[in-house]
Image: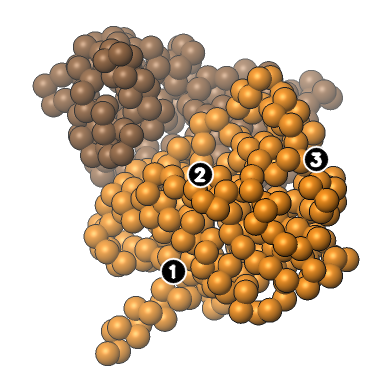
Chain colours: A brown, B orange
Amino acid sequence: MIAETLERLLTEGEVVIGEIVAIRTPGGSFEVRHRSESSDPARTLDIRIFTRPAAARDLARYDRLGRYRSLKGAPNLPTGWRLRLGSVEEVLRALDAFYPGALATWIAFQQGNLAPVNLRDTLQRQSGMYRVTQKITNAQADELVGKCCRSDGGCLRTILWRLDPQTPISSLPLSKFDPRVDQLGQTKKCVPYLCVEACNLLVANARRVVKQASS
Amino acid sequence: MVSRPHSALILVGHGSTLNPDSSTPTFEQADRIRERKIFAEIQCTFWKEEPSLREVLRMIEAPEVYIVPNFISEGYFTERIIPRELELTGPVTQHANKTIKYCKPVGSDTRMADLLLQRASEAAPRVPPSKTALMIVSHGTDLNENSAVAAKKQVSLIRRRNIYGQVLAAYMEEEPRIEDWPRLTSQPYVIVVPFFIADGLHSYQDIPVLLGIETESAAAPGGGAPPTRHVPSSQREVFRRNPYRVAARELYYTCSIGTSPLVADIILDSVDRFDQKHRAKTIK
């Protein structure tokens, strides 16, 4: 289902997720590249070419300055490379290396099989050193999400969860919660990189906020 | 191993927000298993990296899923965090339209002893084993993890084979401590194997300093800041400068055991053992 959906999308045109675009080439193979770069073959002389999907893992691991990207949704993927791949399955593996599960989650969303988890529920199940995050106030959490998750410099995911059932996030623009919106601020038709619940980085930052507030 | 065309394998690693190398051994074991074309699908998931434990099941389409923790020890993560995040109810969980089978972590496999012995003989092929102390080093007390228990189990298994003059475990944060190795070992040759899944701060820096084969300033350029960039080759050099002549001994130091390609076989063993155990239960 996931690979079949990707094949259909690639037949219809380019597939854009976050900073990445995947296309079917006229020769029938596939190319994945940074969407800020041209697909013009004449301009690929100084571009590194990779032919194995596992190369996507290394490309997604460091930003252009060689710093470790601990958050896959961070808008700082390096440029200057192309992935030339032979099958839809390889394209899916590459996309999952850049944006893990983005397509599978999008399919589940469209089928109505996705149940977003509000921040309070995520924090409520934490244990050990992260149990203390349950003490964060909604105001502190809202501010934190506004800083960490914003698309311009934070994370390109589209947020589907709230702070609690009654409390939406107010520190980010409404576009941040709309799967139809290209989080890079362009007007590309995209597969959104959905955020179904707060990640461990946000939980770790919530711990920091609580600890700082109590010290 | 037989082909499992209707099954998926998920490897669970710890991952890290600081150490770029933390997830690499888990991905590489997955690559090795993928090449054997046993499973319909293979995914990796991490506690501290993406895909998270909360999202990985959406990436799987096979009706049967084996989960193998690529962890050294049974404890907090394997008994609490992983089941909680994956919403497992026991060894077998029915999850929507999937049957999820939760296998034992790699570190608890008795074949780890083979890997430790192989790593030791590769690092020091010419030393006489009868005059050598093999020291398995791990973290010790850490977030309820039983890493000390796991190391002791392997030490016990290796001792029974009567290969090395001395076999012992030592820890970073509990007795017997790694820094006491000159007193703990009685042989002229010493081989030290870190009992960790991935190389990182502990194997690059902390343990070499405790062994006295690195100084703190040399091991931690930049004032001890974590390696958020490409690990410089100088950090891996610590595994290539064998032997070290220190404390009137000849010491050999290896990279973490979890980087061995043979861990892929242990992962597959974990799946086989799960089936054997639970099939046996069904027959009874």
In depth, the one of A8 and A98 nearer the eye is A98
What numbered label is drawn on residue B237? 3
Extreme-right residue of the structure? B126
Q: Which residue lies furthest to the left in this view?
A: A166
Tell me which chain the residue with mark 1 is part of. Answer: B
Give the percent coordinates (x, y) of residue B151: 54, 61
Residue drawn where x is 28% and y is 39% of the image: A127
Q: x, y percentage for residue B246?
A: 81, 46
Q: Mark 1 points at which residue?
A: B6
Q: What residue type is labelled 2?
A: Glu
Based on the displayed image, in which of its 4 quarters is residue A163 positioned? top left
Viewer-closest of B180 and A178? B180
Whether callout 1 and callout 2 share a subunit is answered yes
Distance CA(mark 3)–CA(mark 1): 43 Å
Q: Do labels 2 and 3 share a chain?
A: yes
Quarter of the C terminus of chain A within the rendering: top left
Which sits earlier in the primary sequence, circle 1 or circle 2? 1
- Image coords of residue B257 (percent x, y): 64, 56
The reply to whether residue B97 is in sight is: no
Say which of B2 and A46 sits in front: B2
Q: Mark 2 lies on which chain?
A: B
Per the image, the residue denoted by label 2 is B173
